[in-house]
Image (spheres, rainbow, N blue to C red):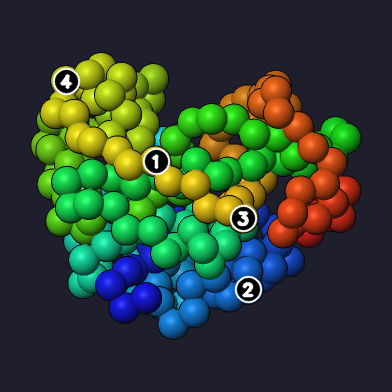
Amino acid sequence: MKDLTVIFLTVNRVPEDWAAYQKNILLKAIGDTEVITISKNPMNWGLNLIQNGKICASNIYYQMLRGAIAAKTPYIAIAEDDVLYTNEHFQFRPQQDEFGYNMSNWGIFTWGEPTYFFKYRIVNSNFIGPRELTIKALEERFRKYPNGTPEDRTGELGRERIEARLGLPHYKTAEFWSINPNLKFNHDYSIDPLEKSHRKRMGKLRAYDIPYWGKAQDIVKKFT
C-alpha cells in the first residue's frame, strides 16, 4: 500500500504484552505500508514523533495533524493502540473531497462478562482520508482554537454536528464496511472517563463469538 501512511497514536499506557500483540496484528494487516508513530515515550518503530501537550481528546487531533504533515503519501489512516485491525480495512480509499470511516467496528470491554457489541457510529480510530484534505481541515480547526478545542465539542472530522458546534466548515464523509470488522477494546487506561469508571454502555447488538476474532472470552485475555 504505497499510497498510504498509517499514523499510529499511543500514550504508552496499555500493558506491554498487549502492546506487542497489537503491534503484531497491525503489522500483519498493513504489510510494508509506511508508519508514523506518535507516542509519549520514544519508540523504535517507523518515523517516531514524541507527543507534546496534555493527554486529552483535542490533543489527539493535534497529533493527527502533526502526523499528516510528516507523511508523504496521498492518503493517511489512523491506528490506535487499543484497536485490532484487519488488512481489509486498509484497502479503502475515499474520494479526494471526503473522509472515510469503516463502520464495521465491534467493541469489547476488558471488565465484566466477555461480550462483543456493535454501535453504529463513526470513530477516529477507523479513519482513512486524503492527506491534504486532512491537513486543511485540522489546520482550520487549530487556527480557530490554538489552545485546543473544547472537550465537549471535540470529535471526528466530517461529523456535521461537531463541525457546527465548533463553527467550522462541514466536510463530507464516506462510510464503508469491511467484511471482517476491526475490534475496539474499552479499558481502564483510556482517556474516556466512562471507560475508566466502567460506566460505558454496550451497543444493543451483542455476541459471544464473531467471525475472524473468535470467542470474546479468549480474545479479551490478550489485553493483559
Which of the pair 54/120 is nearer the observer?
120
Residue marked by disc 2: 24
Disc 1/disc 3 C-alpha distance (Å): 15 Å
Residue 180's disc number = 3
Residue 167's disc number = 4
Residue marked by disc 1: 175
Could you say where residue 137 lies in the image, as x and y percent from the top left?
Answer: 17, 41
Disc 3/disc 2 C-alpha distance (Å): 18 Å
Is tag 1's residue or tag 4's residue first in the polypeptide sequence?
A: 4
Confirm or deny contact between disc 2 and disc 4 (CB under 8 A).
no
Confirm or deny contact between disc 3 and disc 4 (CB under 8 A).
no
Residue 128 seen: yes
Give the residue type that dot 4 points to. Answer: Gly
Residue drawn at x 51%, y 63% is 88
* Secondary structure under the numbered disc 3 in the rendered image: loop
Confirm or deny contact between disc 3 and disc 2 (CB under 8 A).
no
**Disc 3 crowd, CA 10 A, few/some/many (<14, 14-19, 20+):** some
Is tag 1's residue or tag 3's residue first in the polypeptide sequence?
A: 1
Give the residue type that dot 1 points to. Answer: Glu
The part of the image, by quadrant, that contains residue 54 is: top left
* Secondary structure under the numbered disc 1 in the rendered image: strand
Disc 3/disc 4 C-alpha distance (Å): 36 Å
**Disc 2 crowd, CA 10 A, few/some/many (<14, 14-19, 20+):** few
Residue drawn at x 82%, y 47% is 209
Outermost residue toward the bottom in this view: 32
Disc 1/disc 4 C-alpha distance (Å): 23 Å
Q: Is residue 131 depicted above or below 160 in this figure?
A: below
- Where, quadrant-wise, is the C terminus in this rendering? bottom right
Residue 60 left/right relative to 112: left
Is tag 3's residue or tag 4's residue first in the polypeptide sequence?
A: 4
